[in-house]
Image (cartoon, rainbow, N blue to C red):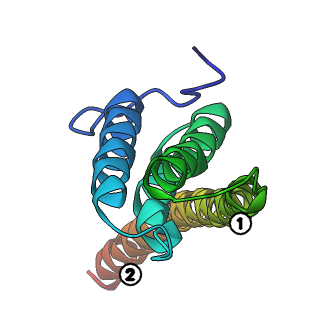
Amino acid sequence: MKILFPDTPRPGRIPQQAFVGIAVILICIIGVIDLKFEPQLSSTFFYLLPVLLASRHAGLWASIACAALAPLMSLYANLATANNAGNSIIPYSDAILRFGVLLVVVRLVRSLRSLNDSLDERVRDRTARLEAEVKERLKLESRIIEARESEQSRIGQDLH
Protein backbone atom coordinates (compact mmCIF):
# COMPACT_ATOMS: atom_id res chain seq x y z
CA MET A 1 0.00 0.00 0.00
CA LYS A 2 2.97 2.33 0.52
CA ILE A 3 3.54 2.46 -3.26
CA LEU A 4 -0.05 3.39 -4.07
CA PHE A 5 -0.47 5.82 -1.18
CA PRO A 6 3.01 6.96 -0.10
CA ASP A 7 2.13 9.89 2.14
CA THR A 8 0.26 9.60 5.40
CA PRO A 9 -2.57 12.11 5.60
CA ARG A 10 -2.25 15.00 7.99
CA PRO A 11 -5.05 15.53 10.50
CA GLY A 12 -8.03 17.24 8.90
CA ARG A 13 -7.03 16.17 5.40
CA ILE A 14 -8.86 13.79 3.11
CA PRO A 15 -7.04 10.43 2.78
CA GLN A 16 -5.51 9.59 -0.59
CA GLN A 17 -7.64 6.47 -0.92
CA ALA A 18 -10.71 8.70 -0.98
CA PHE A 19 -9.30 10.69 -3.90
CA VAL A 20 -8.59 7.49 -5.81
CA GLY A 21 -12.10 6.24 -5.08
CA ILE A 22 -13.59 9.52 -6.27
CA ALA A 23 -11.45 9.39 -9.42
CA VAL A 24 -12.54 5.82 -10.21
CA ILE A 25 -16.20 6.70 -9.64
CA LEU A 26 -15.87 9.76 -11.90
CA ILE A 27 -14.21 7.67 -14.61
CA CYS A 28 -17.06 5.15 -14.43
CA ILE A 29 -19.70 7.91 -14.56
CA ILE A 30 -17.98 9.51 -17.55
CA GLY A 31 -17.78 6.06 -19.17
CA VAL A 32 -21.53 5.52 -18.72
CA ILE A 33 -22.22 8.97 -20.18
CA ASP A 34 -19.78 8.16 -22.98
CA LEU A 35 -21.89 5.11 -23.82
CA LYS A 36 -24.89 7.37 -24.47
CA PHE A 37 -23.16 9.56 -27.07
CA GLU A 38 -21.80 9.02 -30.53
CA PRO A 39 -18.33 7.46 -30.74
CA GLN A 40 -17.08 10.42 -32.80
CA LEU A 41 -17.48 12.77 -29.84
CA SER A 42 -14.10 12.92 -28.15
CA SER A 43 -14.45 12.32 -24.43
CA THR A 44 -10.75 12.35 -23.58
CA PHE A 45 -11.04 15.82 -22.12
CA PHE A 46 -13.66 14.66 -19.63
CA TYR A 47 -11.46 11.79 -18.46
CA LEU A 48 -8.71 14.27 -17.63
CA LEU A 49 -10.41 15.56 -14.47
CA PRO A 50 -10.37 12.29 -12.51
CA VAL A 51 -6.87 11.46 -13.75
CA LEU A 52 -5.66 14.91 -12.64
CA LEU A 53 -7.34 14.37 -9.27
CA ALA A 54 -5.62 11.03 -8.76
CA SER A 55 -2.29 12.36 -10.03
CA ARG A 56 -2.33 15.25 -7.60
CA HIS A 57 -3.49 13.44 -4.48
CA ALA A 58 -2.48 9.79 -4.82
CA GLY A 59 0.59 7.68 -5.43
CA LEU A 60 2.21 7.02 -8.78
CA TRP A 61 0.73 3.58 -9.34
CA ALA A 62 -2.78 4.70 -8.42
CA SER A 63 -2.40 7.57 -10.89
CA ILE A 64 -1.24 5.21 -13.63
CA ALA A 65 -4.12 2.85 -12.84
CA CYS A 66 -6.61 5.70 -13.25
CA ALA A 67 -4.84 6.76 -16.45
CA ALA A 68 -5.26 3.18 -17.74
CA LEU A 69 -8.87 2.85 -16.61
CA ALA A 70 -9.97 5.99 -18.47
CA PRO A 71 -8.98 4.83 -21.99
CA LEU A 72 -10.33 1.34 -21.23
CA MET A 73 -13.71 2.85 -20.37
CA SER A 74 -13.52 5.02 -23.47
CA LEU A 75 -12.56 2.02 -25.61
CA TYR A 76 -15.46 0.02 -24.21
CA ALA A 77 -17.86 2.89 -24.96
CA ASN A 78 -16.48 3.25 -28.49
CA LEU A 79 -16.75 -0.46 -29.19
CA ALA A 80 -20.24 -0.68 -27.70
CA THR A 81 -21.62 2.27 -29.69
CA ALA A 82 -19.64 1.89 -32.92
CA ASN A 83 -21.17 0.34 -36.01
CA ASN A 84 -17.90 -1.12 -37.30
CA ALA A 85 -18.33 -3.40 -40.29
CA GLY A 86 -14.89 -4.95 -39.94
CA ASN A 87 -11.99 -5.43 -37.62
CA SER A 88 -11.01 -1.81 -37.35
CA ILE A 89 -8.01 -1.05 -35.18
CA ILE A 90 -8.90 2.63 -34.91
CA PRO A 91 -10.68 2.36 -31.52
CA TYR A 92 -7.69 0.46 -30.13
CA SER A 93 -5.15 2.92 -31.49
CA ASP A 94 -7.26 5.77 -30.11
CA ALA A 95 -7.25 4.10 -26.68
CA ILE A 96 -3.48 3.67 -26.81
CA LEU A 97 -3.08 7.31 -27.81
CA ARG A 98 -5.38 8.42 -24.99
CA PHE A 99 -3.41 6.34 -22.53
CA GLY A 100 -0.17 7.95 -23.74
CA VAL A 101 -1.63 11.43 -23.37
CA LEU A 102 -2.91 10.64 -19.89
CA LEU A 103 0.49 9.23 -18.89
CA VAL A 104 2.09 12.50 -19.98
CA VAL A 105 -0.49 14.39 -17.90
CA VAL A 106 0.25 12.15 -14.90
CA ARG A 107 3.98 12.79 -15.30
CA LEU A 108 3.50 16.55 -15.55
CA VAL A 109 1.17 16.76 -12.56
CA ARG A 110 3.47 14.60 -10.44
CA SER A 111 6.45 16.75 -11.45
CA LEU A 112 4.54 19.89 -10.49
CA ARG A 113 3.57 18.28 -7.19
CA SER A 114 7.20 17.38 -6.53
CA LEU A 115 8.35 20.91 -7.31
CA ASN A 116 5.61 22.35 -5.12
CA ASP A 117 6.53 20.06 -2.23
CA SER A 118 10.19 20.99 -2.65
CA LEU A 119 9.31 24.66 -2.60
CA ASP A 120 7.15 24.19 0.50
CA GLU A 121 10.05 22.44 2.23
CA ARG A 122 12.42 25.26 1.31
CA VAL A 123 9.94 27.85 2.61
CA ARG A 124 9.55 25.95 5.90
CA ASP A 125 13.33 25.67 6.24
CA ARG A 126 13.87 29.35 5.50
CA THR A 127 11.07 30.34 7.89
CA ALA A 128 12.62 28.24 10.67
CA ARG A 129 16.02 29.84 10.07
CA LEU A 130 14.48 33.33 10.09
CA GLU A 131 12.60 32.59 13.31
CA ALA A 132 15.83 31.36 14.92
CA GLU A 133 17.61 34.51 13.74
CA VAL A 134 14.83 36.71 15.14
CA LYS A 135 15.06 34.91 18.51
CA GLU A 136 18.83 35.39 18.53
CA ARG A 137 18.46 39.09 17.72
CA LEU A 138 15.87 39.50 20.48
CA LYS A 139 18.31 37.88 22.93
CA LEU A 140 21.08 40.22 21.79
CA GLU A 141 18.76 43.22 22.06
CA SER A 142 17.82 42.13 25.59
CA ARG A 143 21.49 41.80 26.53
CA ILE A 144 22.27 45.25 25.06
CA ILE A 145 19.40 46.79 27.04
CA GLU A 146 20.62 45.07 30.23
CA ALA A 147 24.17 46.26 29.60
CA ARG A 148 22.95 49.82 28.97
CA GLU A 149 20.85 49.82 32.14
CA SER A 150 23.76 48.39 34.13
CA GLU A 151 26.09 51.04 32.73
CA GLN A 152 23.57 53.80 33.49
CA SER A 153 23.19 52.61 37.08
CA ARG A 154 26.99 52.41 37.48
CA ILE A 155 27.39 55.95 36.13
CA GLY A 156 24.57 57.11 38.45
CA GLN A 157 26.34 55.57 41.44
CA ASP A 158 29.64 57.20 40.42
CA LEU A 159 27.95 60.61 40.20
CA HIS A 160 26.51 60.35 43.71
Q: Quadrant of residue 93?
A: bottom right
Residue bearing mark 2 = 155
Dot 2 amino acid type: Ile
Closer to the camera in the image, 15 or 18: 18
- Of the numbered discs in the image, which one, if any, rests on residue 101? 1
Task: Give the quadrant of the N terminus.
Answer: top right
Dot 1 amino acid type: Val
Closer to the camera in the image, 61 or 150: 61
In the image: residue 43, left or right of residue 116: left
Q: Position of residue 143 (x, y in %)?
A: 46, 65
- The residue located at (51%, 53%) in the rendering is 74
Image height of 157 relative to 10, above or below: below
Q: Position of residue 27 (x, y in %)?
A: 39, 47
- The residue located at (70%, 63%) in the rendering is 94
The Cα atoms of the two marked residues, 1 and 2, are separated by 80 Å
Task: Give the quadrant of the C terminus.
Answer: bottom left
Q: Residue furthest top?
A: 1
Q: Nearer the viewer, mark 1 or mark 2?
A: 1
Closer to the camera in the image, 40 or 123: 40
Q: Residue furthest front?
A: 85
Image height of 74 relative to 16, above or below: below
